[in-house]
Image (cartoon, rainbow, N blue to C red):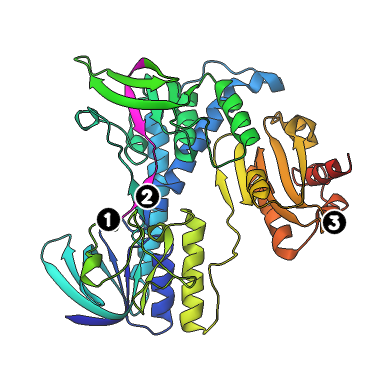
Amino acid sequence: MKHFDAIIIGSGQAGTPLAKKLAQAGKKTLIIEKGLVGGTCINVGCTPTKAMIASAKAVYQARKASELGIDIGEIKVNLKKIVKRKDEIVEMFRGSSEKGLGSTKGLTLVHGEAIFTGDKELSVKLNDGGEAHFTADWIFINTGAKTVIPKIDGLEDVDYLTSTSILDLEEIPEHLVVIGGNYIGLEFGQMFSRFGSKVTILEKSERLMSREDEDVSEEVTKILAAEDIKILTNTAIEKIDKQQDNKLIIHFKADNKNKKITCSHVLIATGRAPQTDRLGLEKCGLKTDDKGYIVVNHKLETNIKGIYALGDVKGGPAFTHIAYNDYTIVYRNLMEKTNYTISNRPIPYCMFTDPQLGRVGISENEAKAQKLNYLIAKIPMTQVARGIETNETLGFMKAIVDAKTKKILGASILAAEGGEIVSVLEMAMEGGITADQIRYCVFAHPTYSESLNNLFMKLED
């Protein structure tokens, strides 16, 4: 049984940089990966989806180029070429990660599946055969999450798509039904609609994106509907039948009425679950919650001293940038003797529909629930100069402001480059810059950020 100072299980956006930094700091380090180096983000998440979304936006812009005085002929979507470009980008990113791990002195990479056999003891079923056994002083779990497959009668007999398998389609679906009306489902739904698929979204809740404010949900629904995407809410799927011609019939209830849809493809986008079921956590007594997420304290340590969980596997916000921040907190605390925690850190995120939804801080609903004394600043993109000039006028900017201090409490930016705009507000929040200061700040003209002047001018109305 070989001993290491540190073992990292999973080479995602927390595991890879942590392994490198620990090894560079002189720690004998092992990183174990059962799949592809880079984890979800690089291989089947952020990188490939955003690459394909860029292609979908190019199609959309080409179709409406005449609004800018540019006449374009027939527009053809070459999905195989789109997928090839996506694959090349993924391979480049993954290759860079593999090279970084391989060139780090004191770092060993093992390909296989890790299972706990005792307190800080692991057995690894090697991908190329055989088994290896390791122990360590520190163990870091970064195994991520996987698609939740709902229990639907007949689903097991269907070649359904997930957020992973849909990335490798070689032909554009004739009619894609998306089960799930949240961030992943909406991104893929709009993408394939723009590629030429008929798209229907089925959401079990009363509205899309039920965790967002009602006005955000309503505006996103309106934007997608304008692109001929059919959205059905309050749905309960009962069964799926596969026909002899391979068409699928989805039987569901909506508004207490029995309905059905015939489609060519179905995408499951109903959420994700932690990859903890095969880790053998019971062998070391490591605690999980009722959904299988590993329980950690505010410094990301589990109930077993020296074992940490980072990224999606620990629950909470499931974002790449949060996983990366987890790594920086753990590394600095252990190696630099700092005292950082995950408490009160900013949780920005962006949904890459078009327009994007950039979010940070609390929503209006959360401000109401907390009974805060707050103000709302809101401006439609039809009143934003840069939006008008670029023909990007869908959506709005919205900020929640403390009525007394004028500090920014949160923002929802549904706009072109919404993720970039909300980052400006996040920096303001981190630095304690008030809405009044932004109202009178000098920004370059004409930029989207300059419109933050106008956004906070609304507080004067």
In the depicted structure, whether residue 133 falls above or below residue 355 = below
Label 1 sits on a secondary structure element that is: loop
Q: Amino acid at mark 3?
A: Gln
The residue indicated by pointer 1 is: 35
The magenta stretch spans residue 133 = no
Q: CA distance from mark 1 to mark 3?
A: 49 Å
Labels 2 and 1 touching (C-beta < 8 A): yes
Image quadrant where one finds the C terminus: top right
Q: Earlier in the sequence, mark 2 or mark 1?
A: 1
Residue 211 lies in quadrant: top right
Q: CA distance from mark 2 to mark 1?
A: 10 Å
The residue stretch that appears in magenta:
259-275
Q: Earlier in the sequence, mark 3 or mark 2?
A: 2
The residue indicated by pointer 2 is: 43
Q: Nearer the viewer, mark 3 or mark 2?
A: 3
Image quadrant where one finds the N terminus: bottom left
Frontmost residue, 183 versus 393: 183
Horizontal arrangement in the rendering, residue 416 relative to residue 377 (left or right): left
Q: CA distance from mark 3 to mark 2?
A: 42 Å
